[in-house]
Amino acid sequence: MRKNLLSSVEPPHLSPLPRNGGEGRVRGKCGELKWRSALLAFYLSAMLVAGCGRDLHTAQGVAEEFVDQHYVHIDLQKAKEYAVGLAEEKLNDEIRLTAGQPIDASTRKPKVNYRLVEKKEGDGRVSFLYEGTIQAEDAPEFTRRWLIVARKEGNQWRVSNFTEYD
């Protein structure tokens, strides 16, 4: 019976014997490199996740969180957490008008992407114009513009008004 010669050959990083008279250098460098690579990958992943969060202490962070909750996730109650004044009244009207029509995990929601088009700053208030692209199943893609106005309430920013345009 013939023995397969390749079955007894191990890659250098798995070999129990040091190569070239060294004291396990191949194994040590490879293991250290893998450990450092894993640590770097973990660090970069953590930085990416941390960078994705919004700073809700800024007008833009609050405005974008509002847009996400209202238009992307269609969670009017959550959007209300970032609203005051007229914006809160408008959300209460929307909640009243959609009562009895649950929006949950089984609801087919459209895919919504948006981008900031314009930002205007004033005394204690900032307005943001976003352009949203909406893709609904079995319907043509369309765009909307959302004007979001944020104002400083104490030490927090809140959405004080919002308007939708075609």
Image (cartoon, rainbow, N blue to C red):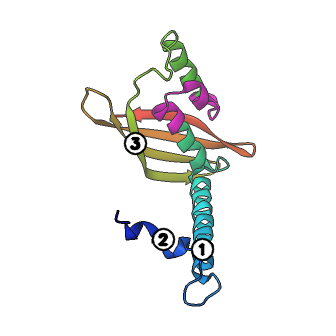
Query: Does residue 123 lie above or below 70 as drawn?
Result: below
Q: Which label belongs to residue 113?
A: 3
The residue type indicated by label 2 comes to Glu
In the rendered structure, are the residues bearing label 2 and label 3 in contact, judged by CB atoms less than 8 Å apart?
no
Dot placed on the residue nearer the N-terminal end, 3 or 1: 1
The residue type indicated by label 3 comes to Asn
Query: Does residue 65 lie above or below 80 as drawn?
Result: below
Q: Give 115 or 19, whichever is nearer the viewer.
A: 19
Dot placed on the residue nearer the N-terminal end, 1 or 2: 2
Q: Is-magenta flag for residue 41?
A: no
| Disc 2 secondary structure class | loop
Name the quadrant of the C terminus: top left
Dot placed on the residue nearer the N-terminal end, 2 or 3: 2
Residue 138: x and y in percent read 25, 26
Few, some or many residues within 10 Å of mark 2 (<14, 14–19, 20+):
few
Q: CA distance from mark 3 to mark 1?
A: 54 Å
Q: CA distance from mark 1 to mark 2?
A: 9 Å
Query: How many circles with numbers are drawn on the protein?
Result: 3
Residue 22: x and y in percent read 61, 88
Q: Residue at x 59, y 35 (%)?
A: 160
Which stretch did the figure color magenta?
67-87
Which residue, given by chain and number where applicable, does mark 2 sit on?
10
Q: Residue at x 51, y 19 (%)?
A: 94
Residue 73: x and y in percent read 49, 31
Snapshot quadrant of residue 4: bottom left
User: Which callout, 3 or 1, points to the residue nearer the camera?
Assistant: 1
Query: Does residue 14 lie above or below 157 as drawn?
Result: below
Q: Residue at x 51, y 52 (%)?
A: 120
Which residue, given by chain and number where applicable, does mark 1 sit on?
16
| Disc 3 secondary structure class | strand
